[in-house]
Image: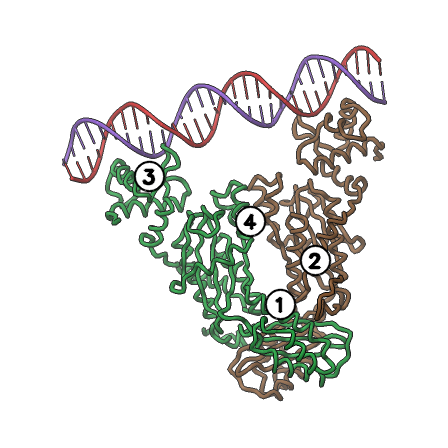
Chain colours: A green, B brown, C purple, D red
Amino acid sequence: MDLTERKKKILRAIVDNYIKTAEPVGSKILAAMPGMDCSSATIRNEMADLTQMGYLEQPHTSAGRVPSPAGYRLYVDELMQDYRLSVDETQSLGQVMEMKIQEVDRVISQVSKLVSQMTNLPAVAMTASAGAPTVKRYELLSAGAGSFILVVMTSGEMVKNKLIKLPLTVSDQDLKLLSAVLNASLTDLPWEGFTPELLERVTRSAGPAAALVPVIVDYVTHVLKEQQHSEVYVTGQMKLLGQPEYRDVEKAQEVLSTLDSETLANLPATLPASARTKILVGPENIAKELRDTSVVMTRFDIGEGMQGLIGVVGPTRMDYAQITARLSYFAENLGRMFGKPELPPSQHEETGDD
Amino acid sequence: MDLTERKKKILRAIVDNYIKTAEPVGSKILAAMPGMDCSSATIRNEMADLTQMGYLEQPHTSAGRVPSPAGYRLYVDELMQDYRLSVDETQSLGQVMEMKIQEVDRVISQVSKLVSQMTNLPAVAMTASAGAPTVKRYELLSAGAGSFILVVMTSGEMVKNKLIKLPLTVSDQDLKLLSAVLNASLTDLPWEGFTPELLERVTRSAGPAAALVPVIVDYVTHVLKEQQHSEVYVTGQMKLLGQPEYRDVEKAQEVLSTLDSETLANLPATLPASARTKILVGPENIAKELRDTSVVMTRFDIGEGMQGLIGVVGPTRMDYAQITARLSYFAENLGRMFGKPELPPSQHEETGDD
DNA sequence: TTTAGCACTCTTCATTCCTGAGTGCTAAGT
DNA sequence: ACTTAGCACTCAGGAATGAAGAGTGCTAAA
């Protein structure tokens, strides 16, 4: 299976060129490239070999060659040159990331937006919790007549709240009691553990504010489920239209509609624990609608046993090197932002240090 | 300017038909329609008149007629028949709306998703507050070493929270003090009112927890600004590709890209206080990229002086009657959901009532 | 005022032809 | 044994052509 150096060089050149131009590349063009010291005829011979080996394809007899999926595979595995982010790029990427993480749960949607912006392709972002999420803490506040604020903190270090309106008058004392009961009985428990009996017991011991219990439980299970299933955010779908291979609206629609569905929720499963970044080339994809489409994805860590995943969807012919580099950079910084406790942000005075 | 009854009938028939088929409609087809008791020749004459009056256009000499913008205008203003939602429809619309309003601020994005789903077209949703938003209430909770939860309730009846991590040890007592100070000094005040002097004073009287002040202020101004500018959610952009007029990717892209921008933020401005629903036909649109595109939008009330806006973007040839009806239905129900205090939702047992 | 008829216009689709790019093969050169 | 030049061959894509069909406008009759 080992290719000669020259074959590798040629294959790489073909993929590189095809990535740039989206046109089949012919022997003449290759021969003219700097670093190719043989004639077009030689290259033709080599290309014939590569085609036979399954690394190249030709759309029709008189067109140039195009990398086959196997060719891409080889390319991303061995041939691809590490793309080095230029100073300009790191700078503008850094700029893009200048957002403040205001609410952890909304960040994910922002992240997908940013990744898309950064790669000029549709992007997905999602979180996945390791282990079933639970509530770590309940807090109840009164907010005027008949209004209550429920604050819950989950095992994923997320804080969620809900404004509950219920025609009910209870004292602060009563709310305290209810909070205490909730914290005693319904913490560190996945939502499946909320058995009717348990709830019954909680309601009984909840005192005057017992009417709030069902609403609270309802909300909490919702939050926990949401955290478990981990919402998937897809952004920048239209970016796909910019790519020549999706000029055909039918095709674009096909891909875009699968992007919407829960196909993506299965993506993380395909990401082995070992690797941080994975590239799925064309037919390797789970959904057959994504046959002519590749996916690059990277994992990043959020503290507290939660992980995030960001990915980019694009034509098989995409700039794997560049995109991988950008994605990694992004993931790395995100990990930092989440992982580290937040530093006091740009306080009273800017001292310009970092 | 008054048209004869027959002319109106013909114009309406043309628009109706064109809405359905997206093809120029010819005299023969019209003559064949039930309720047309004249021959194609007569209709040709009438159509010639209507064309001259500017209500119709013909793409080329030997094609049928197509409504002009003026024609559409007349149609939506006078000719359009009220579309009555069928029982089936109300049912399925009702189903779509079965979501629980869990977090008010995330609802808007959901709403836009639903509207899009419902109309099969791109949809926008946004909120706009009347008057500058302010904070009504602050609450601080400690959440383990170096972690604090900030809960703020805004004038728009929204509750937001943030997990603050700061290497700082303060007693619950100190937090109470800080909350009290914040509630005393920084409530009912738009963010522009957070002057350096005021903040200085707050920090001084904040006691041991003073280090939290900058973080809190940072977050709060962010929240208030966000609420002021009212985020705009656009969903279902790809739905546009399903429409024949956007088979041309160029065009679709053009429209979609303007949909992304803040063009939409200006939409509400064009909605007069008088009307609940407004239809913008083609050239009347603000952005010239939306020239061949129409917008239908409806206002709905959220309590507390806040309003919401939902809208649909589609080709000039869209089923105004149907879409208007659906939008209104939606807006009405939304208004109800927000306006009324929430009833205890489907409690202990599901009694199947609604 | 309405209708039938007819000539005219113009798009659309299929067919044909041509060109150019790119290949594979062969034979000569190193 | 490998490389190169040359040449015939193939095939997609674009331009040109022609026939078919849809729809119109106008005229003359009802």
| Along the line of sight, the residue nearer the viewer: B146 or A260 | A260
Residue type at numbered disc 2: Met
- Of marks 1 and 4, the one in the foreground: 1
Find residue A257 and name its label: 4
Q: With respect to residue B169, does A73 lie above or below?
A: above
As drawn, the residue found furthest toward the front would be A197
- Classify mark 4: helix, strand or loop: helix
Disc 3 designates what residue? A29
Question: Which image quadrant: the N terminus of chain B?
Answer: top right
- Of marks 1 and 3, the one in the foreground: 1
Task: Compare marks 1 and 4 and give the one earlier in the sequence.
Answer: 1
Disc 1 designates what residue? A222
| Along the line of sight, the residue nearer the viewer: B138 or B34 | B34
Mark 3 burial class by Cα count in 10 Å: few <14, some 14-19, many 20+ = few
Mark 1 burial class by Cα count in 10 Å: few <14, some 14-19, many 20+ = some
Whether labels 3 and 4 belong to a single chain: the reply is yes
| Residue A151 % position (x, y) | 63, 75
- Classify mark 1: helix, strand or loop: helix
Distance, label 3 to label 4, CA atoms, is: 37 Å
Image point (53%, 45%), residue name: A254
Residue type at numbered disc 1: His
Left or right: A33 in relation to A349: left
- Classify mark 2: helix, strand or loop: loop
Callout 1: chain: A
Distance, label 3 to label 2, CA atoms, is: 58 Å
| Residue B233 % position (x, y) | 63, 57
Q: With respect to residue B65, does A113 lie above or below?
A: below
Distance, label 2 to label 1, CA atoms, is: 17 Å
Disc 2 designates what residue? B97
Distance, label 1 to label 4, CA atoms, is: 26 Å
